[in-house]
Image (cartoon, rainbow, N blue to C red):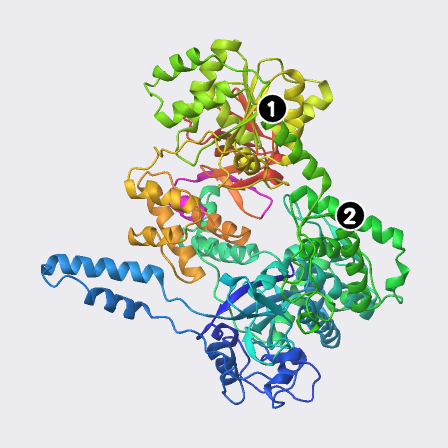
Amino acid sequence: MTVSMRVMSAGDGYKYLLRTVAAGDGDRSLSTPLTRYYTEEGSPPGRWLGAGVAALGGAIQVGDQVSEPQLQLLVGMGRNPVTGDPLGLAYPAYRTVAERVEERTAALDPTLGSASRSETVARIEAEEAARGTRRAVAGYDFTFSIPKSASVLWAVADAGTQALIADAHHAAVAEVVAFMEREVAATRTGATARDGAVAQVDVRGLIATAFDHYDSRAGDPHLHTHVVISNKVQTVLDGKWRSLDGRPMHAATVALSELHEAVFADHLTRTFGVEWEARDMGRDRNLAWAVASVPEELMVEFSSRSRHIDAEKNRLIAEYVEKHGRQPSATTIIKLRAQATPATRPEKQVRSLADLTTEWRERASRLLGVDATSWARRVIANDAPLLLRADDIPLEAIASLGQSVVDVVGEKRSTWRRWNLTAEAARQTTGYRFASTVDREAVVGLVVDAAEVASLRLTPPELATSPAVFQRADGTSVFRPKHSTVFSSEVLLVSEERLLERANTTTGPTVPLATVERISAKPDREGRVLGPDQAGALAKVALSGRVVDVLVGPAGAGKTTAMSALRRAWEAEHGYGSVVGLAPSAVAAQVLADDLGIATENTAKWWEVHQRTGQSFRTGQLVIVDEASLAGTLSLDRISALAVEAGAKVLLVGDYAQLQSVDAGGAFSLLVHDRDDAPELVDIHRFTNPWEKTASLGLRHGRTEVIDTYMEHGRVTGGETETMIDAAYTAWRADRLAGRASVLVSDSNESVLALNQRARTDLILDGTVHGTREVELHDGTRAATGDSVITRRNDRRLRAGRSWVRNGDRWTVSDIRDDGSVTLRRAGLRWGGSVVLPAVYAAEHLDLG
């Protein structure tokens, strides 16, 4: 994404923006902030942006420099950055950790002994420290980044060209902010939300500050701008100062990102005539648009920290040779490289653009084999480009694009709103070059309108007309949020209707009550006896005759035990092999096969085999679809249709309160809530502590107050992102050293990559990972004997014992061969379950685990 957003808190949360600002005044005769501060160490000072600046009294103009006192007043305190006057209500003041600790300790029983009191106070301090200090929302930090190819071109170009590229970037940022002011920014007024009478009204623009940064933390070229939008806005309706409505700010971020990328590409093409091309970014990534003349090798050069690691590795090798008088062995080199890999991200270095540019040009020149600045001059020497106006796009093309947008969005969502359509419309028109941003916005708007027409509107129309004073400029009512209409598709609704009909059809196969009771009363091979809820659910499913049935159970409720008993009862009536399994993923299908001892397959593969061979179900079969909340609605419709045709029964097993399908889903939840007697397992067996059983159910039902329970038991720790990443890694490492199984989870690919590298470094240094050879993986990491890895692509040709290589399987590397192929052993197995991955698979579809 070229635009990302994070919420900023009141107080001193703005100070990170000032840490790298240049101290000098720069040369005021130069035209842009980037050229003005070219030789100064650090980034240019921020500048004011947004139409809302005019409402501050005229002392500040758009483009003026931002000072720290002004930021403190506006973002830190919610006040006018010039006069210090309050802009509406003050930010609420929340009690600090120390204040909360003092209040709770003052209320302790005075008769407590000193030891008990000390222990209780320590527990209170730990709990309150974990909760941290709550802060009011002061604004939103939108980071606008230009594509990597454009950053590389900017990095090595001459200063004049750099200024023009920066101008294109600044223009794109300003135009997207103006779009936000028209289409996104709003505030709420009127009665409380509880009374349902809140009006969402327009505002007199946004008050924003923009801070330019040159490089990434690793020192690679990364031209980007932090646009901090104040939470304080002036209402058009009555002129009062209120807070931004945060809902559309979150909902529109992806659409803004797609629009910004296209608008910047237009500006760069209008300035230099460059052409753009879509490039494959690898597994699980969208296509990325890049300047066609910038080679991928140059982008890779400026996208990896590996050169820093290699430089430090070479230094350590030289040090080793000097000390020992010989070259280190291959095994020692691997360890030296591990020592050279920083445990955390490098500290941000404050350098001048002049110094950075000199280094970037040298590196690019070595890779290109020619002077990089001369190369950049040739890249921007082009004929005048062919640019489109809005009326150059035929209406037939608009309608076709609108239908295409709905098709793509409808594959992933069961319902959508205008912002979802806008993001996809902007994405599908990125390849067009327009003469102006007005033309682009017009075409994207027309495509979105066409997509809305091609969608099925679920939100009912307004039945009464609002008075003119309560209407926006476009005639819509302020009592209905902008762009809040919910859409779906007829195809999806018809599929849901068919599933509901099958769930209420009771002509499917059953099992006699006597058989069910006999199986329910007997323990299984491991001596487990069904609990009352499990026996009741088993009877409901076996006796219902519903063609499509459901079984609901939260994590730890014993679904596997119940399904195992159901399998025995079903096969007692319908014969061996009468129970088969399906699941949305190959890994889930394998787990189901292992748990129940039945033939299983993932839903996509089963459907592909059916289409190719005609393979289907047979009369009397029970088709168990596990993890059914993750199954797409259209997939379940197809599978259940074939089951009805064959005289079989489909049982959907899952939990409607857990993750939903990555495809258009929601069918499992729909079927569960359509009836009052859905079979459900309610007794949790998995947890040791009684409080945890209750708390997990509270989380499942969305009761946020349960988080306090976890905090009281020391299960939640809070802090800054870097601190939390370090704490999570430390806890994971301690678990491993103690011989416990542990899972380390992060919220971004970048963090996962950094954590994998850090873990691998420690595993090399303690001898867990060893050997004389390494293989390089697709993301620049490496693997050697002893490494934990995950396969990321299903490949049935690669057999591992009685199974095969699946997406999501975890393995341990047992050998790296000279030809780049890798021998793996299934994680947790001492022998058996091994496979040799071809070099191509290892290089493209293997991750550190």
Is residue 778 part of the magenta span, yes or no? yes
Asked whether, in this view, residue 193 is left or right of residue 462, the answer is left
**Which quarter shows the N terminus?**
bottom right
Residue 71: x and y in percent read 52, 80
For the residue marked with disc 2, what is the amino acid? Ala
As drawn, the label of residue 609 is none
Q: Secondary structure at mark 2?
A: helix
For this view, does 273 lie left or right of residue 371?
Answer: right
Quadrant of residue 722 within the rendered picture: bottom left
Please name the residue that numbered disc 1 is placed on: 505
Are there few (<14), some (14-19), or many (20+) residues within 10 Å of tag 2?
many
Q: Nearer the viewer, residue 294 or 617?
A: 617
Disc 2: which residue: 454
Q: Position of residue 144 (x, y in %)?
A: 64, 66
Check disc 1 and give the amino acid type. Thr
Residue 101 lies in what quarter of the image?
A: bottom left
The spot of residue 638 in percent (x, y) is 67, 28
Q: Is residue 34 visible?
A: yes
Q: Magenta span covers which residues?
A: 760-779
Q: Can residue 831 be seen here?
A: no
